Image (tube, rainbow, N blue to C red):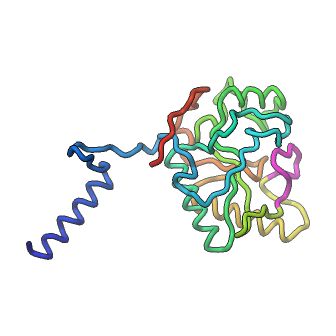
Amino acid sequence: MNTRLLLKQTILSALVLALFGSIGADGAEVAGPSESEFVDVKSVAPTILVELRYATPNNFTRRPLYRAGMPAMVRLSVARRLAVAQKFLEKRGYGLKIWDAYRPKAAQAQLWKAIGNHAYVADPKDIGSMHTRGAAVDVTLVDGSGREMSMPTEFDNFTPAAMIDYRGRSPVVRSNLKMLQKAMAHGGFYGLRTEWWHFCAADWTAYQPVPDIQLQVRAP
């Protein structure tokens, strides 16, 4: 076969697979996951660290709100954006650690009951949290060894010190926060005014809240 023709056919086949999925052993087309499907973040960006605080007592409620072993789940499009942010950081000797991702509606209701402040927790009876849509994450910055970097506050600090616009005196904290913000913006996220750790996908309104169901998560 002509080498140039073979090359064209190979390129065309690759484009078809990228657009429409792969082909199974029986010749049938195997569709890939949609951008809105839920996936485990680690299946898309395996080097991102995960420490879901609400799956442990290490949160302000002092008790687990998630089932044990729950993975960090987000929409596929969000996971891919996190992978972009992670690559940005890895080139500079840093990385991401996820403190929260998808949040079941029941857990959101418990947080609202505990805080009841729109500045920090979304009322599940209104539009709900971006977390319940699988379109937001709570993250922090780690170094190349996975150690958490100095940031403005600890997670879930409900004081003005947690504002996204850091007003403290530490140049190290300011630099770390700016690095995190640059990486997340590079991945297509924007921050929340009252929580330096909270970032949501720019198109979060495209996804509906998902209630308390057992999500069928698969690798992309």
Q: Is residue 38 magenta?
A: no
Residue 130 makes an appearance in the image: no
Q: Which residue is outermost to the front?
A: 25
Q: Is residue 62 visible?
A: yes
Q: Main secondary structure of the magenta part?
A: loop
Q: Is residue 167 left or right of residue 37?
A: right
Q: Residue at x 60, y 62 (%)?
A: 86
Tell me the quarter of the picture where residue 181 sits: bottom right
Seen from the viewer's position, the closer of residues 152 and 96 is 96
Quadrant of the image containing the N terminus:
bottom left
Residue drawn at 75 percent across, 49 percent down: 193
Q: Nearer the viewer, residue 59 or 85?
A: 59
Q: Position of residue 131 (x, y in %)?
A: 64, 39
Magenta span of residues: 151-163
Residue depicted at x 75% and y 39%: 54
Residue 73 lies, in percent from the top left, at 59, 43
**Left or right placement of residue 189 versus residue 157 in this view:** left
Q: Is residue 191 left or right of residue 74?
A: right
Residue farthest along the right direction in this orientation: 169
Looking at the image, is 103 positioned above or below residue 189?
above
Q: Residue at x 82, y 44 (%)?
A: 156
Looking at the image, the residue that sits furthest to the bottom is 3
Percent of width and height locating residue 166: 83, 59
